[in-house]
Image (cartoon, coloured by chain):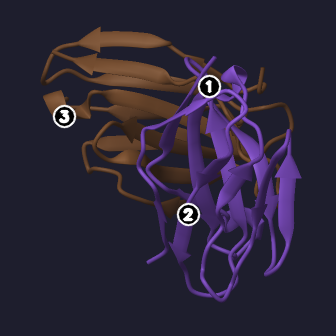
Chain colours: A purple, B brown
Amino acid sequence: GDSVTQMEGPVTLSEEAFLTINCTYTATGYPSLFWYVQYPGEGLQLLLKATKADDKGSNKGFEATYRKETTSFHLEKGSVQVSDSAVYFCALSDGSGGSNYKLTFGKGTLLTVNP
Amino acid sequence: DSGVTQTPKHLITATGQRVTLRCSPRSGDLSVYWYQQSLDQGLQFLIHYYNGEERAKGNILERFSAQQFPDLHSELNLSSLELGDSALYFCASSVAPATGELFFGEGSRLTVL
């Protein structure tokens, strides 16, 4: 079945450092790929997405490119802030769309940014 | 605020007991999903309902059941609780047809003692 593997962390960075969180996937068909973020005490929220190969999703300074050849969707940010401290989840859709849609998540990566 | 409401936020109970978790989706969303989040298993998909009908099942135990009512709210019933059922249970909703964005509630934290 579909699966997502992401670096487990935790990741600890200083403010303004460069961030990479690796994510690879296994799926049949042509899934869409997502990064969700979970701030302390809150539910998950969508950070960015890409729906086809070579698409780049971006939001709030974060970027990820859908690489079909390497089955990867790595999350990057050029300069992290303390407010970026959260758990980041990589996810994929089953590609079927419509009313049978569901997401499969990776285990999450805890990011802590120190001032 | 995602617009998804889950109650209760916290629940402490004993082994062998039964609990019901409630979820109200965003206005207009027909799909409701339940996920279980634990430290060792991560975020596990349990079940998906669309407009009152079960559409997909994930790693949901037989002791667990769910339903979605005509007003679209959903309930997750957990019975014969075990220590290992302690987790954060999330409900999420989405528009239909889905675009990939799920809107999550803040979760219900279940502690089984």
* Secondary structure at numbered mark 1: loop
| Chain letter of the residue carrying label 2 | A
Nearest-to-viewer mark from 1 and 3 = 1
> Dots 1 and 2: beta carbons under 8 Å?
no
Real-space Cα distance between discs 1 and 3? 24 Å
Q: Quadrant of the N terminus of chain A?
A: bottom left
Q: Which mark is residue A23?
A: 2
The relative height of residue B30 versus residue A45 in the rendered view (above or below) is below
Q: Amino acid at mark 3?
A: Gly
Which residue does the numbered mark 3 point to in the structure image?
A: B84
Q: Residue at x 67, y 38 (%)?
A: A17
Question: Is the residue A31 above or below the residue A84 in the image?
Answer: below
Depth-wise, is mark 1 or mark 2 nearer the camera?
Answer: 2
Could you say which disc has been placed on residue A39 in the image? 1
Which sits in the foreground, A115 or A36? A115
Q: Please tell me whether mark 3 or mark 2 is closer to you in this view.
A: 2
Is B7 on the left-hand or right-hand side of B103?
Answer: left
**Type of the residue with mark 2:** Cys
From where the camera sits, is residue B69 visible? Answer: no
**Image spot of residue B92 (x, y percent):** 64, 39
Residue A61: image location, x then y, percent: 85, 43
